Image (cartoon, rainbow, N blue to C red):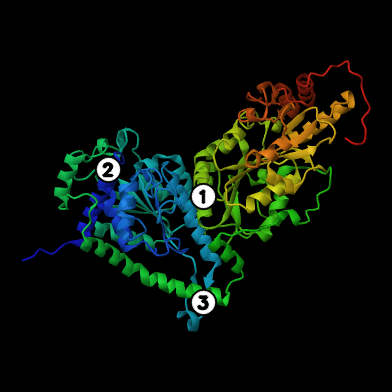
Amino acid sequence: MKQKINYDQMSINYLKALAIDMINKAGSGHPGIVLGAAPIIYTLYKNHLNFSTTDPNWINRDRFVMSAGHGSALLYAMLYMAGFNITLDDLKNFRRAHSKTPGHPEYGVTSGVDMTTGPLGQGIATAVGMALGSKINASKFILPNDKKIFGSNVKKPVIDYKVYVLCGDGDLMEGISYEAASLAGHLGLNNLIVLYDSNDICLDGETNHTFSENVLDRFKAMGWNTEFVKNGEDINAIDRAINRAKASNKPTIIEVKTIIGAGTSLAGTNKVHGSVLGDAETKKLKRLLNVSEDTFYVPDDILNHVRQSISKRYRKYFYNWDDSYKKYVDLKYSGDYNLFNNILNSRFTYDLTRLNWDFLDNEKDALRDMNGKIMQKISETVTTLIGGSADVASSTKTYLYQKPDVTKDNYNGRNIWFGVREHAMAAIMNGLALAGFRPFGSTFLSFADYQKPAIRLSSLMNLPVIYIYTHDSINIGQDGPTHQPIEQLAMLRSIPNLRVFRPADAHELVGCWHEILNHSYPSCLVLSRNKTETLPSTKAENVKYGAYQVLSDPNKNDGILIATGSEVQVAIQVVLSLYKEYGIRCHVVSMPSMELFLEQSKEYQESILPKNVKKIVIEAGSSFGWHRFVDDPKYLITVDKFGISGTKDEVLDYCDFTFEKIKNRVIELLELSKQEETVEIIDDI
C-alpha cells in the first residue's frame, strides 16, 4: 500500500533543501536559521500571510519583515515556492552581483521583500512603524455602513493589514528593539505579530554568556500579548499561536523554541550559524529529510501543493477587498479621498515657493520657530505629513497645532509622541514611509548620532523620511559640548543618497521644504535655535541648485566666501566690512545643500565657484568634506574641536568663531594689509 505523503512536512523539507543549495552554491550564507526556522516561515506563508503574487505591491497586503536578515536564503526560497516572481536561476545567483537575491533582503530588489534588513533590531523597529501606519490608515479610510453596496452592515477599513516579523536572539539584544516595542505596547498595535526564533545561540556561542532575562516577561511588562511554542517543528502549535495572536487586542510576540542547524552534525551550536554545510553534510541532511539529492529541485506536486494552498486562501480575500476598494473609489467615500490617493500612489507635487509666506526682510526670528510656522501651513496642504519628536517638540517647534495626537484610542491623528527614543523614532519613521506617509521626526543635531543606523536604511531604501534637527551649532552656548554639534553635519553629508539642508533664513527654509516634498529621497533639515535675519537676497527658488550667490559684484571678484545656515549672515557682514575698510569686493555664496550643488552641471558649479578665485568656507562645524571646494585646507574657517560650557559669546571665542576672529582670518587669507587706504562704501555693494 502506497504511503500517504505528508505534504506540509515534505514542503518544509524541500524548503530547507532549496535554501541550503543556495548557500552552498554561493559559498557563503547562514544555514543555521534556514534549518531551524523553516517551519515558522512556512506556516506563516501557507496559513496566514495575505498577499498577491500577481500584485506584490497590493496596498492592503500583510507585510512580512525578516528582521533576522541573515536568513535571506530561507525567505527567497519561500518566496519562490509561494509563487512570487523569483526563478530557480535567481536562487542559483544568491549573493551574486545584480541578482534578485542579495545577501540580505533589499527593498525594491526582490518581489515580496517589504523592507531592507540586516542590521539587527532595525527590522522589528521599522515593523512598528509599518503597523502604526496601517492603524492610522485604517482610522481614515472606512467602508460605509451600506449593505446594498458592500454586502455588510459592518463598517470596515479599506486598509487594515497586519505586520509579521521573524526575529532572533540577536534582534532582541539590540536596544532599538525595546525602544520600539515599548511604544508599540503603549499604542496597542495589535496588528503587529513578532515570531521569535529562540534557539539560545548567537554568532560567538550560547546566548547564556550575555542574555539571561525572560524575554516574554519583559514584553508582557511593555503591554504585549505573549505566546510560547516549545517545539519549533510543530507547525500545528505555531499555527494555533498565530491565530491567538491575530485575535489579541495587543501586539504579540510568539517565542518558538528551535534548534539552530537542525538535522546536521553541528545542530545546536554556533558553528552552523554562518558556515556553509558543504557537500558531504548536505547529502547526509537530504537523506535525513527524505528529499532528492539533486540540487535546486522541488517536485512538481510539492510546489503545486504550496502554491495552490496559498493561492486558494488569499485569492478570495484579495478579490473581495478589490471589489470593495473599487466601489469605495468610484463612490468617492471619505473626506480624505485625496489623501487616500497620495497614500496609494505616493505622488506629490507641491509648489511651496509660490505661496505667500509674508516674510519681512531683516525680520529676526529663530529658524526653528520659522520652521514651526511653515510646518503648520504645510500640514494643511500636505495631508500625508505626520510625525513628532523625541520628547523635544517644545524646543524643536515641530508640534502640529490644530491637529490631533495619535493615541491608542484614536489613531486618526497627525502628531506622534515618540518619547525619548531617538533611534526607534528614526526606524519607525522608515516604517511610516513604507506605509505611504511623509514622516518627520525632530531632535537636536548632536543626537543625530543615535539615529545613524536607521538613517542609513532610509537612504538605502530611498524613503521620503524627513529628519529635522535644531540646535545646529556651538552658538547654543551653555548646554555645553555634549549638546554642541561638531561632526554631525559631516557625518550626515557622508551618507549616500541623503540630502542635508542647512538654510540661511526663512526664504531658503521654504525652498528646502519645496525640494524635500517634491522628491522621494530622505532628507535632513538642520536649523538654528538662535534668531536669524530674513535676508533680501536669498531666494527660495534657488535652493534647488544647492548653492547660489547672495552677494556679488558683476565687475570684480577678489574672493568668495562660502557659508551655510546662520554663517551666511556672518559672511555677508564680513564682506561688507572688508569693502568699507579696503575696497575689496568679495562674493558670498550660500550653500544650503552641498549634495544638490554637486548634482548640478560642471558649468553651473564653475559659474558659482570659478577657478582661479580664492574660496573660503565658513561653517560652525567640522571641516571634513569641505576640502573639495577650496585649494588649501587653510581656507577652511570651521570648528574642529569640541566646545565648552559657557555663554554663547564665550563659546564662540573659545572656538575662534567670533565675528572679529572670522574677519581677521579672512583678512589673513586674502593677504590684505592693514595699512591700505580706507575707502568709502558705495551703493552698488
Whole-number angstrom distance, CA of label 3 to CA of label 1: 31 Å
Name the side, left or right, on which 492 lies relative to 588: left
Name the side, left or right, on which 485 lies relative to 146: right
Amino acid tagged 3: Lys
| Numbered circle sitting on residue 327 | 3
Amino acid tagged 2: Lys
Local crowd size for mark 1, using a 10 Å CA cut-off: few (<14), some (14–19), many (≥20): many
- Residue on which the image places disc 2: 25
Helix, strand or loop for disc 1:
helix
Q: Earlier in the sequence, mark 3 or mark 1?
A: 3
| Numbered circle sitting on residue 449 | none
Whole-number angstrom distance, CA of label 3 to CA of label 2: 49 Å
The residue at 40%/65% (across/down) is 54
Helix, strand or loop for disc 2:
helix
Name the side, left or right, on which 402 lies relative to 386: right
Tag 3 and tag 2, C-beta contact below 8 Å: no
Q: Tell me which corner region of the image, top left, top right, bottom left or bottom right, holds residue 475.
A: top right
